Image (cartoon, grey):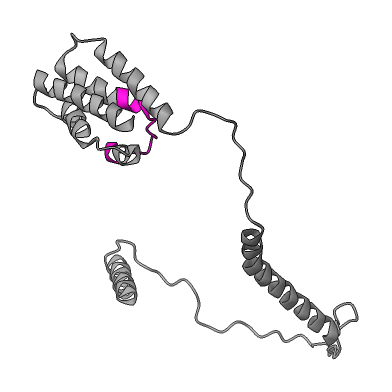
């Protein structure tokens, strides 16, 4: 298939060259003379041609063979290293990094979600759209969302069913219809449920 395209491209280029040559307003005038150049009639000196190369350029065949053998050996060593070095590293193993005792696991997540829920419920008079978005942001503050994660990936990583809250957030954040107070209350209930499931 690629040769067909190359053939079409070459044919198109030839057509352009022929068309450009035939329609040119400039005419070609041959100013070269077709006569052969004059012959040099001066006598030539017969110089003997050297039959042997000078010693500086003459390299024995063994030097070429040694160079070739060295290059082949160097290539083989490179191939062996390329194949065996990763195996050797895997056998050796990678030592882990020791981490200090930091609050890990679901207890830290539960505390952060509870704190986010308290912050969310401390502003009852906000508009419904803002309340739904605030519920989602409270969840993101509780369990850090990586910059490359979509909301769906974030909820899957969370380990609890947060699909309803995610859908409400996407509707409030990106939708054109108004968010009702019932949807804001549903977001609060979902955030409370997530806290209970994580605990």
Residue 141 visible, this orientation: no
Name the residue furthest right: 55
At x 28%, y 71%, the residue is 15
Q: Quadrant of the C terminus?
A: top left
Left or right of residue 124: residue 102:
right
Q: Position of residue 195 (x, y in %)?
A: 29, 27
Q: Considering depth in this image, is 44 or 49 the residue closer to the camera?
A: 49
At x 61%, y 41%, the residue is 97
At x 20%, y 10%, the residue is 124
Left or right of residue 87: residue 188:
left
Q: Considering depth in this image, is 47 or 162 the residue closer to the camera?
A: 162
* Residues in magenta, as a range: 138-152
Q: Considering depth in this image, is 18 or 43 the residue closer to the camera?
A: 18
Q: Quadrant of residue 169?
A: top left
Q: Considering depth in this image, is 11 or 99 the residue closer to the camera?
A: 99
At x 20%, y 18%, the residue is 131
Q: Quadrant of the N terminus?
A: bottom left
Q: Quadrant of residue 180?
A: top left
On screen, residue 17 above or below 137: below
Q: Position of residue 54 (x, y in %)?
A: 88, 82
- 55 drawn magenta: no
């Amino acid at each position: 298939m690629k040769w067909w395209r190359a053939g079409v491209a070459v044919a198109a280029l030839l057509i352009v060259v022929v068309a450009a040559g035939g329609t040119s307003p400039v005419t070609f005038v041959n100013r070269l003379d077709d006569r052969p150049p004059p012959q040099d009639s001066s006598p030539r000196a017969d110089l003997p041609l050297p039959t042997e190369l000078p010693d500086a350029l003459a390299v024995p065949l063994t030097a070429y063979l040694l160079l070739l053998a060295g290059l082949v050996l160097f290539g083989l060593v490179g191939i062996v290293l390329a194949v065996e070095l990763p195996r050797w590293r895997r056998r050796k193993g990678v030592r882990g990094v020791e981490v200090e005792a930091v609050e890990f696991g679901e207890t830290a997540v539960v505390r952060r979600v509870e704190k986010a829920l308290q912050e969310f419920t401390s502003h009852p008079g906000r508009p419904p759209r803002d309340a739904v978005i605030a519920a989602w942001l409270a969840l993101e503050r509780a369990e850090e969302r990586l910059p490359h994660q979509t909301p769906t990936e974030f909820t899957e990583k969370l380990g609890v069913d947060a699909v309803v809250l995610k859908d409400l957030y996407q509707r409030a954040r990106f939708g054109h219809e108004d968010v009702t107070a019932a949807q804001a209350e549903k977001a609060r209930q979902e955030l409370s449920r997530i806290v209970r499931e994580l605990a």
